[in-house]
Amino acid sequence: MISTMVAARVSPSRVGAVMNRNVGALRSGPSYWLVLLSGFFEPVLYLLSIGIGVGALVGDLTLPSGRVVEYAVFVAPAMLAVSAMSGALSETTFNFFFKMKYSKTFDAILATPVKPFEIALGELAWAMVRSSVYTIAFLMVMVALGLTSPGWALAALPATLLVGLAFGGVGMAISTLMRGWQDFDMLTTGQFALFLFSGTFSPVQDYPVAMEIVVWLTPLYHAVELVRGLAIGELSWGLLGNAAYLLVMMALGLTFAARRIQRTLCV
Amino acid sequence: MVHPTVAVLERNLALYRRLWLASAFSSFVLPVLFLVSIGIGVGGYVGTIGGVDYLAWIVPGVMASTAFQMAIGESTYSVLGDFRWVRAYHAMRATPVEVRDMVAGWLLYILIRVEIAAIVFLGITALFGALHSPWAVLTPVIAALVAMSAAAPVMAFAASIEHDSYFALLFRFVMIPSTLFAGVFFPVDQLPQLVRPLAYLSPLWHGVELSRAATLGVAAPWPIWAHAGYLLLCCAAGLTWAIAAFRKRLQD
Amino acid sequence: MPEQPLIHARALVKRFGDFTAVDGIDLDVAPGEAFGFLGPNGAGKSSTMRMISCVSMPTSGELRILGMDPVREGPKIRARLGVCPQLDNLDPDLSVRENLTTYARYFGLSKAESRRRADELLEFAQLQDKAGSQVEPLSGGMKRRLTIARSLVNEPDLVLLDEPTTGLDPQARHLLWERLFRLKQRGTTLVLTTHYMDEAEQLCDRLVVMDGGRIVAEGSPRSLIQTYSTPEVVELRFADGVDYAGKLEGIGRVDPLPDRILLYADDGDAAVSEVHRRGLTPSSVLVRRSSLEDVFLQLTGRTLVD
């Protein structure tokens, strides 16, 4: 997930060189499935460390509605949203970029009657498979730890899918703009900043007002709010706004990605 | 005449000159963002721990874990790449440079990177008012020990594998659990008895406790010599392994 | 012996597990010589080269490089060798010039001296206008020239070149040969491996032909051709699949290859007249000078490049 990417981002051109030669072989790599599987553990580890470990120091937290919950209950849905985001982004950025620039997969596909928008949708569908495997597993962990009920977990599931779709769409759009592996650095940077400051670890109401406004504009905040509202059963009209934000983000991302695929590849 | 180890170090620094900007984020900005989000954001709800505010409590931990993560991150793709694709070590092997120079040249490079990051971080945290003891000036030395005890075995590992996807496993199953559970964010006493020895095994925990003792001016859980001794032991073992792994990789 | 040989090997063996790469070879290379190992892939040339460059230890036998023992005095020997490996191992993220200067530092040269030699070698490699560019975008020929230039940075007594022109296009090869020839003229001792006979003929004063880890012949290109071949060779191709080898008997030695028949003769044109006199009508006829390729074929029954 994110910290893995942060750790891996050493010298971009070298990692890039490694990636160039290896992403193709990734699927046949000795531990590809293990790597894929291990992607699920990272948010769980964060949940255990910050949610439960630091949570023991924090004690309880009062939500804006006045309801008092354990700190882990507050953090878990945020980790769930992050998990959905990074599952979708890793497939639609790194892997998508490789397919577009290096393996020329799309050139081959576009030689058939398939249209650019259909490629974008197809890629997104695959990203969603990976993203939802992670989120379903994470929801089961939350239920097992008593951080949500099975009913609310089911309610949160479609929300995580929407989060995956929204970030997947934007991820693809970003990939079409990437010039090289170096640019992924900025993406990772942005992703990590979102991870730390989207109401994930503490309520945004605590942030200074200026910062709160900035955060209010960023996508992970809406993802966290929506998933958290459903996972802990704090329903409000605001959730519809969060969902609308994500829907628009998905639509814009997909349209833009399709247009860029058209422009870069169909010339 | 320039020592071959220094020549290797110079080569690594020459490469870094081209890449420093890209790494500035993980070395300088990231740890500070972490402090703000967790130390100040979550810290507001924690109140005090061990008599100090939460921010002051995690500062030494974040410092040690930054050194730890940098040391690991830097010693993975770069080292494997220099064997597999760049073949830089094969080039060195044809010169008077010996394996010990290659290993030492890399570790010195890591050391310089970590020390710069540690000193900058120390300065920033002093501005936050998070340093409570003059012993804090020792934290860059502790960061150096942590970095060496992590970089040496990781570069040995990088020299022993063929496929870079093993690094993802190293990050997920060693580096991140260490960062999250080795006393950086909460005391290891809170861990279940069963997994606590795992934290003791991690060099990071010893570094965190030493750094915390230094910045807060308190006693460490174990005697200082035990923590420092364990770190030195890790360095020595890692160094031996790294030299053996490099030698094996460069054989025939 | 008037001068001590730079390379001295007796019964030199290299084994990897059960596989014997080098199977007991003897050789001496004198100062100022251009010496070649000719043979197909897997003949043991590169294994021999790696032992000479002191990065691989002999399994058994005697080996002295520059009069020293490679096992005990590796770094001291390597300080006086120039090695150009088969696979380029330049630093792609460093500039062309930095590749030379960082490498010079491995030999303990001062910064000023490293810069001076880098300038000199950039000129030698005809890469002055690429000095500041990174290595990655250079052509294969330029990278090779840079690797060779880099191997000269310590002003070595002995330069080892492992397959210096493999993978290059003809133009790049000729440019490289010209540079190596210049080195040779300066009196630099060159040892190279190749599976190209034209390269061996162009560059080597003396060479050994290797096959299956053994030396099967030794001498100058000219003497090898004289000993193992005839001055001229006629290459005949026939359109039909009939076996003509028998019908050529008595004209000269006949070597039937899958796609053509080689006919060894002192006088090629006379041999061709004889072929026509016998009423044979080859679809193509080529008379050429004999080459090391023919020597190799005669010695091993196989062609060099398949």
Image (cartoon, rainbow, N blue to C red):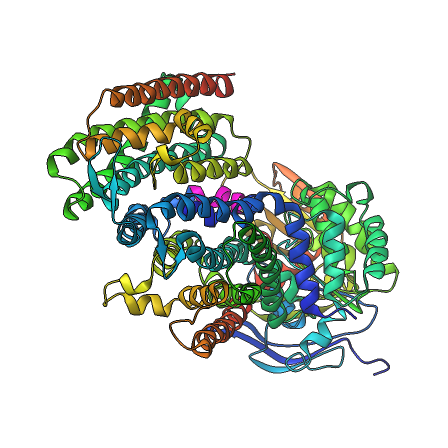
* Quadrant of residue B227 within the rendered picture: bottom left
Q: Is residue A221 above or below residue C276?
A: above
Residue positioned 58% across, 67% down in the render: B103
Q: Is residue C86 left or right of residue C130?
A: left
- Magenta stretch holds residue A16: yes
Residue positioned 59% across, 62% down in the render: B111
In the displayed orientation, state which residue is furthest to the front. B51
Residue A164 seen in render:
no
Q: Is residue C256 left or right of residue A83?
A: right
Q: Tell which of A74 and C120 is nearer to you.
A: A74
* Quadrant of residue C147 within the rendered picture: bottom right
Q: Is residue A222 left or right of residue C183?
A: left
Residue positioned 51% across, 26% down in the render: A177
Q: Which span is picked out in magenta? A: A15-23
Q: Is residue B143 left or right of residue A47?
A: right
Residue B242 on image: x %, y %: 51, 69
Residue C89 on image: x %, y %: 63, 55
Residue B220 on image: x %, y %: 41, 71
Residue B175 on image: x %, y %: 40, 57
